[in-house]
């Protein structure tokens, strides 16, 4: 604890200040730009729409005048109603168009007629139909003030979403730069200095870090080991044997030296590199989160309805989970960098194909290939962290935690950006953007990864030497495995079924645009980012598992009830947030319980292998989640699907609680 | 030690192949002007003039030899013989009849009955793109522009004016192209839910249609509640256009046509007509590509026109009190 506090003073505080400064600057600039864009809406949008109404009115009046000039009498003008209707259909921002004769009688009305009930809600332009100095009538074109307000609100919402998304992205970039350039080398050097302070001079820092401090420490370690070798050589002299042996024994008991140069390298914690590399493909994939189920339903119209929304998601996740074991072996043979670049190329090509060809088969194949590419990329990233995982026990959970953080940041920032691109350019452009981002990550991987094979690829199942020979009872062991299985399966099933499919489907039924779906998803993903660590810390520190689990069940129960009652309404977004929060809280508690039990077991008897069927069940739950939710959504609608998924969570939580109770009893 | 003279000799030896590869200025050889035989059914029209103009625009130095051959097979054969004798690089055929005469009967690719050794580019204002493609199919030396507007597009234009539901048509049974057009019109009318009322022109003992029967046929259509008279592209009908459209007007029956002649020189109400200038320009560009770039004619597909001209005869509209809708007036050409 004391070491950690000193480390914190040495580098973590400085890194935090640096990130805070960068983010503060970015925040200030972003805020200023957002306020400026916000104010532009008032300055430009309202007058622009008014001008448009005037221009449309002028053009329509001119066409009527032209018809009269061609020889059509005023009272014989033909096709004015369909003409006005077509103008309004082509310009959704125009609310109505009227043709009024010289006596003020209404001849033609196009639009919904809202201006009759509430004329103050409309901005109108009046244009006279005049020929040869005779005014025959007038064309009135109106714009709905509420439309203007709604457009401005949309622009402001988009600006706000972009502001938050770019802030989160800036945080991710700043964190990556500070961690990789400062925190990791400093932490590494501090570890080495800590070992030296404890009298252990056998290590040197990994040569992969080109830091002057690390080089200096390496040189110092080298000189100390050489001096020790010189001392032992001199002590071996017969004349000094008697005097030197006690001193050497004493030094050997106090200090540990390498006999020739260095005993081994101290590997670098690569979890930050994993986070940066994984973030790019997670971000690229999450860009399509807001519209993929709806987009799939349109493209797969020839398939049965229950397959349309979930099948592409299932294809992608199945490609991922099935390719993962093979990708591990392949990464070991090909090297981390080669494997990563190959994975990026597979994923980028798949996304580009999905972007260029609007076809059901290409969509399914593209999703599957992208899943395979992600699996290869993830395997190579995890291989890069393997050395740290094997030797530094305290980094044991570093890589998964970094991956989880990258996942949440991507889920917050990508959907609104993807939604805005989909609304402004098109869905296919989103796939293309994802492909380009993955190519960028290929460049990053070329820099951060290498093909060295100093360490054999280690799986987490490899048993470590047991510090304590005391083994747990078989019943408790089985209980831990069941807890792991239940929590992992439910969490994976709900990611595929709830977050990736049911939520976008439900939002699509209530929201007006893809961008607004993305904004809601951003808010829903931000809640776990805010509350997830809080819940995890609470349950980790206070041992209040049962209380928190009951709280989660209460939240989910309260959140799911409105979804069983009638068609979707925007007001239920609060219930959805409650449901999401409850699920996150419950899963966080369960995963903490399981993590704690696994850690305790590891300290007692080392890592134990996970049964194959447990892994298969958890991965199957991930892949089949979207398909099951899609089936349910077709059968009973997205509302009921959300409710049923909440019920599935509750059932899983109840089962988890029961197994936890039995496991606790078995221990006592 | 290499002497200065030996060094220069080596350099000259090395430089020789490089110098031979460089394009050095030499005596200029005059480029041969491309010779085009322009076969015309009648005097040069707007399409033929646009063909000439496009060749000049594409920077092609050409010698154009015009030959007015009508539909006389003897004159056509003589013109082809002359073209071969004078080493023509391309034959331009103005009109569907000439194009068919040069290309030979459908399915045949016999050098004795058709021109197969000289590239042929045609403009045909009476052939639809499908008919034009069928003409060039299997013939490696034929391409061109088939500018006639498909009947389905014509029906769209008709219904843009008014939602006519009963359309009458006078069919010239002596003209195979007209019969084919009416056949296509039947299919399109069925798709558009338009009832097509047909009246066939009686033929005299020589097989020619009787012009005197036109007023009675139009009156019969009016009695059958036809709301519009559709006049297909047909040379005989164009010749008798005034009689036909006057008869229609006397029955208070508006008439639609795909032939500009009926609008400009007779009293048809409105029509959707191909632009001969556009057809000539596209054909000229095809000829330039064949002569300048060496493109094979069969690699250049027979083209239709991307857009057509809607012409409205306002004097007829006023007489019928059937004024065009405002939206159509935005794009139409008005004849007063």
Image (tube, coloured by chain):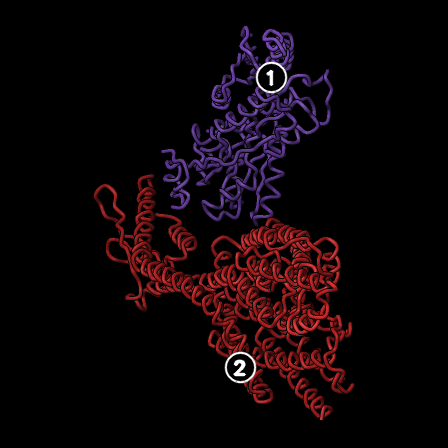
Chain colours: A red, B purple
Number of the front mark, 2 or 1? 2
Q: Do labels 2 and 1 share a chain?
A: no
Nearer to me, A174 or A148: A174
Residue extending farthest to the left is: A133
Is residue A431 at least partly visible in the picture?
A: no
* Spatial CA span between label 2 and label 1: 79 Å
Classify mark 1: residues with Cα within 10 Å, few (<14), some (14-19) or many (20+).
many
Seen at 59% across and 59% down, the residue is A218
Tag 2 residue: A562
Q: Residue A172: image x %, image y %?
A: 50, 63
Nearer to me, B37 or A632: A632
Is residue B332 at least partly visible in the picture?
A: yes
Could you say which quadrant of the image residue A492 lies in? Answer: bottom right
Classify mark 2: residues with Cα within 10 Å, few (<14), some (14-19) or many (20+).
some
Q: Residue A60: image x %, image y %?
A: 34, 48
Q: Is residue A523 above or below residue A109?
A: below
Seen at 61% across and 80% down, the residue is A592
Residue extending farthest to the front is: A239
Identify the element where label 2 is drawn.
helix
Q: Residue under mark 1: which chain is it in?
A: B
Seen at 58% across and 34% down, the residue is B171
Tag 1 residue: B90
Identify the element where label 1 is drawn.
strand
Label annotation for residue A620: none
């Amino acid at each position: 604890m004391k070491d950690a506090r000193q480390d914190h003073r040495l580098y973590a505080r400085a890194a935090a200040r640096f990130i805070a400064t960068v983010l503060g600057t970015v925040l200030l600039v972003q805020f200023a730009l957002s306020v400026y864009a916000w104010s532009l809406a008032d300055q430009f949008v309202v007058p622009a729409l008014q001008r448009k109404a005037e221009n449309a009115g002028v053009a329509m009046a001119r066409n009527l005048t032209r018809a009269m000039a061609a020889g059509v009498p005023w009272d014989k003008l033909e096709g004015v109603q369909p003409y006005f209707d077509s103008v309004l259909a082509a310009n959704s921002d125009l609310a109505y168009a009227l043709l009024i004769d010289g006596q003020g009688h209404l001849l033609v009305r196009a639009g919904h007629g809202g201006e009759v009930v509430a004329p103050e809600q409309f901005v109108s332009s009046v244009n006279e139909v005049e020929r040869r100095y005779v005014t025959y009538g007038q064309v009135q074109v109106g714009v709905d003030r509420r439309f203007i307000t709604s457009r401005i609100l949309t622009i402001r919402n988009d600006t706000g979403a972009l502001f938050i998304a770019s802030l989160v992205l800036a945080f991710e970039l700043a964190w990556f730069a500070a961690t990789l350039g400062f925190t990791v080398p400093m932490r590494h050097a501090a570890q080495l200095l800590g070992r030296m302070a404890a009298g252990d001079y056998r290590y040197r820092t990994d040569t992969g870090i080109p830091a002057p401090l690390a080089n200096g420490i390496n040189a110092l370690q080298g000189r100390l080991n050489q001096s020790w070798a010189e001392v032992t050589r001199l002590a071996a002299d017969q004349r000094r044997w008697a005097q030197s042996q006690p001193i050497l024994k004493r030094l050997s008991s106090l200090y540990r030296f390498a006999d020739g140069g260095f005993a081994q390298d101290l590997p670098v914690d690569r979890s930050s590199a994993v986070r940066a590399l994984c973030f790019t493909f997670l971000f690229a994939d999450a860009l399509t989160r807001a519209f993929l189920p709806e987009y799939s339903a349109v493209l797969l119209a020839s398939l049965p309805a229950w397959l349309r929304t979930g099948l592409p998601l299932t294809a992608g996740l199945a490609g991922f989970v099935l390719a993962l074991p093979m990708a591990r072996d392949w990464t070991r043979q090909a090297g981390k960098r080669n494997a990563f670049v190959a994975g990026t190329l597979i994923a980028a090509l798949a996304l580009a194909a999905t972007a260029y060809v609007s076809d059901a088969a290409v969509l399914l194949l593209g999703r599957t290939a992208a899943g395979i590419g992600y699996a290869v990329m993830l395997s190579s990233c995890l291989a890069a962290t393997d050395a740290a995982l094997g030797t530094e026990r305290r980094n044991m959970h570093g890589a998964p935690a970094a991956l989880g953080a990258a996942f949440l940041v991507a889920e917050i920032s990508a959907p609104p950006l993807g939604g805005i691109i989909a609304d402004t350019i098109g869905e296919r452009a989103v796939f293309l953007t994802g492909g380009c981002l993955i190519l960028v990550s290929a460049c990053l991987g070329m820099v951060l990864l290498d093909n060295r094979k100093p360490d054999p690829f280690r799986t987490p199942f490899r048993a470590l030497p047991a510090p304590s020979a005391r083994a747990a009872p078989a019943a408790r062991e089985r209980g831990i495995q069941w807890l792991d299985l239940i929590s992992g399966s439910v969490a994976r099933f709900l990611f595929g079924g709830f977050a990736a499919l049911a939520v976008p489907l439900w939002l699509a039924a209530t929201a007006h645009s893809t961008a607004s779906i993305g904004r809601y998803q951003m808010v829903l993903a931000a809640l776990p980012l805010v509350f997830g660590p809080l819940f995890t810390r609470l349950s980790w520190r206070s041992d209040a598992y049962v209380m928190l689990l009951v709280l989660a069940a209460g939240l989910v129960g309260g959140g799911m009830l409105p979804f069983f009652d009638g068609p979707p309404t925007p007001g239920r977004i609060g219930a959805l947030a409650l449901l999401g929060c409850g699920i996150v809280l419950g899963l966080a508690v369960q995963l903490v319980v399981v993590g704690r039990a696994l850690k305790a077991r590891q300290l007692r008897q080392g890592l134990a292998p996970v049964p194959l069927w447990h892994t298969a069940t958890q991965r199957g739950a991930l892949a089949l989640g979207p398909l099951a939710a899609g089936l349910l959504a077709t059968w009973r609608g997205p509302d009921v699907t959300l409710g049923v998924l909440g019920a599935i969570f509750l059932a899983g939580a109840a089962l988890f609680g029961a197994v936890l109770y039995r496991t606790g009893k078995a221990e006592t | 030690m290499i002497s200065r003279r030996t060094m220069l000799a080596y350099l000259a030896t090395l430089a020789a192949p490089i110098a031979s590869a460089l394009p050095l200025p030499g005596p200029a050889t005059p480029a041969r002007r491309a010779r085009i035989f322009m076969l015309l059914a009648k005097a040069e029209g707007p399409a033929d003039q646009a063909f000439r103009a496009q060749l000049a625009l594409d920077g092609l130095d050409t010698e154009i030899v015009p030959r007015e051959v009508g539909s006389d097979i003897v004159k056509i054969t003589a013109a082809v013989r002359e073209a071969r004798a004078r080493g023509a690089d391309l034959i331009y055929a103005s009109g569907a009849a000439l194009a068919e005469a040069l290309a030979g009967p459908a399915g045949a690719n016999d050098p004795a009955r058709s021109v197969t050794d000289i590239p042929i580019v045609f403009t045909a204002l009476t052939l639809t793109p499908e008919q034009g493609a069928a003409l060039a199919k299997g013939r490696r030396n034929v391409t061109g522009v088939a500018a006639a507007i498909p009947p389905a597009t014509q029906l769209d234009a008709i219904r843009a004016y008014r939602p006519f539901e009963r359309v009458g048509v006078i069919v010239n049974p002596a003209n195979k192209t007209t019969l084919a057009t009416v056949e296509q019109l039947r299919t399109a009318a069925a798709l558009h839910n338009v009832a097509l009322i047909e009246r066939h022109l009686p033929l005299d003992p020589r097989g020619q249609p009787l012009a005197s029967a036109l007023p009675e046929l139009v009156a019969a259509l009016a009695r059958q509640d036809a709301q519009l008279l559709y006049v297909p592209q047909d040379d005989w009908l164009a010749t008798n256009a005034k009689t036909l459209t006057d008869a229609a007007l006397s029955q208070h029956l508006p008439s639609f046509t795909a032939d500009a002649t009926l609008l400009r020189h007779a009293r048809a109400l409105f029509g959707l007509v191909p632009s001969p200038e556009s057809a000539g320009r596209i054909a000229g560009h095809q000829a330039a590509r064949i002569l300048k770039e060496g493109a094979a004619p069969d690699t250049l597909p027979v083209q239709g026109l991307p857009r057509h001209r809607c012409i409205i005869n306002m004097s007829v509209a006023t007489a019928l009190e059937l004024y065009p809708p405002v939206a159509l007036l935005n794009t139409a050409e008005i004849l007063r």
